[in-house]
Amino acid sequence: MSGANSFGRSFCVTTFGESHGPAIGCVIDGCPPGVPIAPEDFRADLDRRATGRSRHTSQRREADEVEILSGVYQGLSTGTPIALLIRNTDARSKDYGEIAERFRPGHADYTYWHKYGIRDPRGGGRASARETTLRVAAAVLAKKLLTQRGIRVQGWLSGLGPYAPARIVRDAVERNPLFWPDPEQLPELEAFLDGLRKSGDSIGARLTVIAEGVPVGLGEPVYGKLDAEIAAALMSINAVKAVEIGDGADVCGQRGSEHRDELTRAGFLSNHAGGILGGISTGQAIIAHAAIKPTCSILVPGRTLDVHGNEVEIVTKGRHDPCVGIRAVPIVEAMLALVLVDHLLRHRAQCADVPPQQPLVPADPFLP
Amino acid sequence: MSGANSFGRSFCVTTFGESHGPAIGCVIDGCPPGVPIAPEDFRADLDRRATGRSRHTSQRREADEVEILSGVYQGLSTGTPIALLIRNTDARSKDYGEIAERFRPGHADYTYWHKYGIRDPRGGGRASARETTLRVAAAVLAKKLLTQRGIRVQGWLSGLGPYAPARIVRDAVERNPLFWPDPEQLPELEAFLDGLRKSGDSIGARLTVIAEGVPVGLGEPVYGKLDAEIAAALMSINAVKAVEIGDGADVCGQRGSEHRDELTRAGFLSNHAGGILGGISTGQAIIAHAAIKPTCSILVPGRTLDVHGNEVEIVTKGRHDPCVGIRAVPIVEAMLALVLVDHLLRHRAQCADVPPQQPLVPADPFLP
Amino acid sequence: MSGANSFGRSFCVTTFGESHGPAIGCVIDGCPPGVPIAPEDFRADLDRRATGRSRHTSQRREADEVEILSGVYQGLSTGTPIALLIRNTDARSKDYGEIAERFRPGHADYTYWHKYGIRDPRGGGRASARETTLRVAAAVLAKKLLTQRGIRVQGWLSGLGPYAPARIVRDAVERNPLFWPDPEQLPELEAFLDGLRKSGDSIGARLTVIAEGVPVGLGEPVYGKLDAEIAAALMSINAVKAVEIGDGADVCGQRGSEHRDELTRAGFLSNHAGGILGGISTGQAIIAHAAIKPTCSILVPGRTLDVHGNEVEIVTKGRHDPCVGIRAVPIVEAMLALVLVDHLLRHRAQCADVPPQQPLVPADPFLP
Amino acid sequence: MSGANSFGRSFCVTTFGESHGPAIGCVIDGCPPGVPIAPEDFRADLDRRATGRSRHTSQRREADEVEILSGVYQGLSTGTPIALLIRNTDARSKDYGEIAERFRPGHADYTYWHKYGIRDPRGGGRASARETTLRVAAAVLAKKLLTQRGIRVQGWLSGLGPYAPARIVRDAVERNPLFWPDPEQLPELEAFLDGLRKSGDSIGARLTVIAEGVPVGLGEPVYGKLDAEIAAALMSINAVKAVEIGDGADVCGQRGSEHRDELTRAGFLSNHAGGILGGISTGQAIIAHAAIKPTCSILVPGRTLDVHGNEVEIVTKGRHDPCVGIRAVPIVEAMLALVLVDHLLRHRAQCADVPPQQPLVPADPFLP
């Protein structure tokens, strides 16, 4: 059966925890047995997601030490639920005292208050992006399973305010703190972010995530379509307001003769579809994009109400990111990885007996 | 438990059927008892979705007579599963004979073939948009439940190839076969579509769907977020490649001071969020958009392979829509209605005891 | 996601329909592709379950013609939902007119009325055992999949009122209308049933169902245990009041040294466990039992209330079985088959990579 | 969505942890907001379940200190997932060294080994009854919600080897370490258990659990029947081999005129049904029974195999209960409480608008 804080059907992740509670954690149910896993395996991706890595992200510093509570014996997954725990160590709740009684515009304060009649205001409680730490941690296992099968997931920033990369240099992405694929633009971007921070404001972003090596055949019609579940996965990330697959919103302006990806013996001639047709993977690169709103925790004063209904001014002083999209790169990777692993397992549940056929050579993911 | 062809947790719809099989149908499980329902209630929305209404849609004509097989007694829902059945009456399979052995580019032919090792090629089989008929039918019940609670769902076309409405005249939407909200643009659009049809090509579209009167508090953190489920719901519709909530992809270029919807005693001052914060409804209008690709069933010859691996030319002769987005208007409405009803029931499961609080006056949905 | 009228996680069956509505049916979602299936395949098991086969069952005669509505192409399952439909042809609602306003003791009339505020009284509506027809139909597919893997499911009557079989002659089960495994007792049993019918009364029964050839390893800890799901499956059958696995209720009186099934190189030495340890199959025969209550639709007058709260006498005249347990044999087989197929698919989702090990020789299922 | 280690649809509990791993825990998703909860609330029921309370249970002593990790703010549930953690403090893995390579007969060792290809042998790993600690902890919340609604759950031992209570003195149950309802039999029972312990053997048991004050209308046809889910809930408890509702297995010998519970204005005249008809509660006491096998961890030598396939003798020396059924009393209560709370929430999801009707006066639960 199920709860709203669980994700995935065969590889099922349940997360729990509030930003400033004692701990955050997750339970992974359905992981295949025999996967090697150690606490240090989480370090790299959690560091990529962590705050405090550069002056462009929140200065909150969490150790993010992962404790493996169950499901692993002698370094291998056993097939039983794997629980991961991270203690909250740098939770300065005093920073948030002022906003306990005020609804921050653009935040979940107002909606949680009305839905539940009670809310944990410390650091955004359950609605904080801190929850996504566990998505990244759970996806470390997912990525291991994908890597074993030759599938690689990579994300980067493909928009930041008015900027878009002039070119995609994939090797450059991990070599700068902005996960930006065009290294020549970095000085300009950093100056832009510095100015933004000085003005106490924030900016939106766009992210791209791709998966290469995905076999043809993942995804299930009609509500379990691969793209439908990727859409839910990415839209469930804090602040995401749009999800696109392949050419995404641009398809509105395209003709059928232009959009269709023709097939030849040499392979597909293009990848407008983003690697998914009819909700099922084509064998080409899966390509998805997400737009992420600017954080509304800013120093620019704004109008709001308090819990008693009074009009008040609000300034959010905590330690916030001027662009939450930057740190979202490992999160979009995590969600895509989780969807893919889940579908790999679901596919073999139903179709393990289908004789594999020779798939076409995939087009380069950057073909138009 | 669950299958991939089911949607919704408390108000759960399962659809079945292929485009040219004997019938299509659905089972609605979890509908509250006492809802009046009769076969003629489905007529209006099915007609809005039907082919053959104007020269701009496919000329296939289906009677789409809904038979209620169960769950209704003396005109009222009883709380048990409601099964709806529609016979396929105009299934000219001979039209599709030529493509049985060829993978239409941009279609699910290739992916179904690889996933299952077998496919029903007649009219696209399960991957045909004919499946969406039942989504619209199931949503007739959902809309009844919403209407009882003062919630109204409305969709329209907000993009067609290079065109976007200059203004939104909501009353005009239902008075033209294109569901276009700006009546002055209609002659130009019709001429564009006529030209397209003559050229044997097709075009993409953008749709907008809103829900007004939604109470604050619908949606569940963190994977059951209202926007995450709307994203899955819309992305699961055939040909949809992008889903946006509120300002959607535009948030990339916004600042926090610009995006946040400020609160005053007079209500929210804007609705950039599209009525959802932290995955939970704010009481403002829910606003969502979907981009739909041009159909790839076109007369313009294209390159493809046949099932034996030979390179062949393909021309898709059937009776196809030059712009499948037009008929998708009732479908996006249906999916939004299904998500909302499901969350209404889920909300009262967990939170029926929470004393209701006075929500803010919602902003006009068209405020920036 | 899911509804209460769905069963199974990977091989998911949803049923719908009332006893005297237009039709009953089911949707099977997740069936592997390539399974041969034709309308006549349902005949044998539906006949075994049907009324009117002997003087010991209800004289209602349903043709029970199965129409395959979807998911099958050229005689093979395609991997998409398979919908099966059976029209209700012999629904004499007039028989039930008298009870529309009276709550039959021992029936669901009273509980449906209170839960939903409305009920379909014709023939018991949704609560009628007619619903189980579709379980049997769905299990025809399940049994095909099991047979392909060398798994055989067989059920029989192991108790009828005061009688228990003196010996188990498995070949005899299908050669008598009572599914009774001890042919020498048949004359006595038939006389007992004749007497019962004359007195207008009914009697309870006990059923046993076993599965042989089940591989070691099916079942998932801890709520998806194989025995937990078999328990739910059997208890969900109308009138079942007890479910036992292996030695069942007798384990209360056993010692550990007596109950444990010892292992030797020649195999297990006994099968008290009924083929399941820790919720996972051992490779021995799965053995389950169900106790089924006497139908309360009898001619013996009883006290009850009508819907207005008046005390009234009730006599249920319809066409009822003196022992509903007899026809339940194919139903318990069906439910066990559905659970096993579901777990076969779930097992390969998670554990397809586990190298198979040599299982022990199973003990004869009838060892103590 | 869902995993096999989750239970419940609206009030969803996921457990994790192995007997001798670092910790065991659970996540409760869907708990209504505003429920008071503190670490000390778990004490009473965990003590009832704990080992080491009398000489008749295992001498392992666990502190079982519950840490609340999330979902609670200022002492009240917030509606977000509630995670509970218990560290394993008395895990003497050396006790289990000998059995790491031997399959204990009657245990899950053999089945886990074959299913997963790997197992955590320390104390039975995931298959240990230690997992049930969290079921009891989660049910502390469930019981609070039930108590608020006037529903009381109580369990007791109703069989121990050859003994059955001569009478049910409910007040006596909590006043003896055996949860035995007939205080006069205690000396005899204790002598029996002492003899059993000396002989190094173990014995089975039978448990009864009832719920009083349950409103009419809980439960959903046809696979979500209240009794079907109770059956799964109880059968999922370690060592349970039979589940009975109301008269249970005895219905085989009953006539319809005897079994049916007649209705009068003074109420039901009996409760053979155990408070459930057609899968929906009648308003009478819910009555369920479970049979629990004797533990197979005994000192009496037995035959088995080691992981290399050699025949070996096994003696299980650890600290085991001669009758695991005794400590199972709070566990059967927990599972019944979890099912009832889940159905309370599910019922109001679908049927909150049904006007409540006056239910009948329930019969005394001990009427025949």
Image (cartoon, coloured by chain):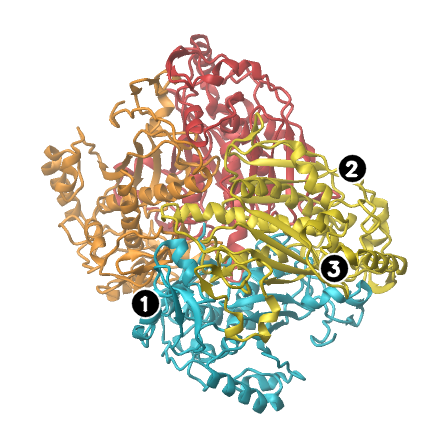
Chain colours: A yellow, B cyan, C orange, D red
- Residue drawn at x 23%, y 50% as measured from the top left: C300
Give the residue at mark 1.
Answer: B21
User: Which of the labelled discs sits on residue A88, or is there none?
Assistant: none
Amino acid carrying mark 2 in the image: Thr
Q: Residue D208, image x and y in percent? A: 44, 32
Q: CA distance from mark 3 to mark 1?
A: 49 Å
Amino acid carrying mark 3 in the image: Tyr
Local SS, label 3: helix
- Up-down relation of residue A184 to residue D229 (above or below): below
Tell me if residue A163 can be seen. yes
Amino acid carrying mark 1 in the image: Gly
D11 and B289: which is toward the camera:
B289
- Mark toward the viewer: 1 or 2: 1
Same-subunit check for callouts 1 and 2: no
Same-subunit check for callouts 3 and 2: yes
Give the residue at mark 2.
Answer: A89
Give the residue at mark 3.
Answer: A110
Residues tagged 3 and 2 counted as in contact (Cβ below 8 A): no
